Image (spheres, helix red, strand yellow):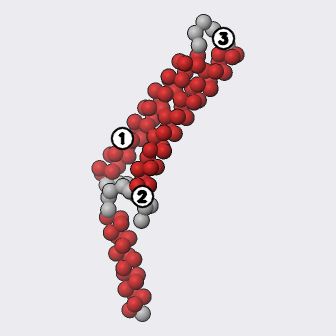
Amino acid sequence: MNKFVGQIAAKAGRKLKAQANTMPGVWFGLGMMGMVGWSVAVPTLLGAALGIWLDEHYPGPHPWTLALLVAGLAIGCWIAWFWVTKEERAIHDGQVHHDDA
């Protein structure tokens, strides 16, 4: 029985130590890079696709594709900036809860 209690105490101690470690792990960093990449890529591609569709269906003197591609890129960069600053504030405030342990 004492051995079992010791094992539980050791596991609880490791879990508390992992929770006290406020430095984000490798998986957190990789997830953040993926989130930033997708948050830029998706609006850029959607803008380009909408521009191509508009150019095919409503041709005009100015191409929509380039304008909407740049607009999508700008929106994606803003979204990425928003999420990175939000996560940075959470890290500095000690509110990050990641499942690396």
**Can you tell which quarter of the image residue 6 is in?**
bottom left
Looking at the picture, how far across and down is residue 56, in whole percent? 69, 16
| Mark 3, residue position | 59
Rendering coords of residue 68 (x, y %): 55, 21
Labels 3 and 2: the sequence-earlier one: 3
Direction from residue 70 to residue 61 in the image, left or right: right
Residue that carries the numbered disc 1 in the rendered image: 85
**Callout 2 crowding tier (Cα within 10 Å): few <14, some 14–19, many ≥20:** few
As measured in the structure, the alpha-carbon distance from the residue carrying label 3 to the one carrying label 1 is 40 Å
Furthest-left residue in this view = 92
> As drawn, is 13 to the left or to the right of 61?
left
User: What amino acid does circle 1 point to?
Assistant: Thr
Separation of residues labelled 1 and 2 (CA atoms)? 17 Å
User: The disc labelled 3 sits on which kind of residue?
Assistant: Pro
Give yes or no for contact between labels 1 and 2 (Cβ–Cβ under 8 Å). Answer: no
Residue 17, placed above or below residue 87:
below
Q: Quadrant of the C terminus?
A: bottom left
29 above or below 71?
below
**Quadrant (top left, top right, bottom left, bottom right) of the N terminus:** bottom left
> Circle 2 sits on which residue?
98
Mark 1: secondary structure: helix
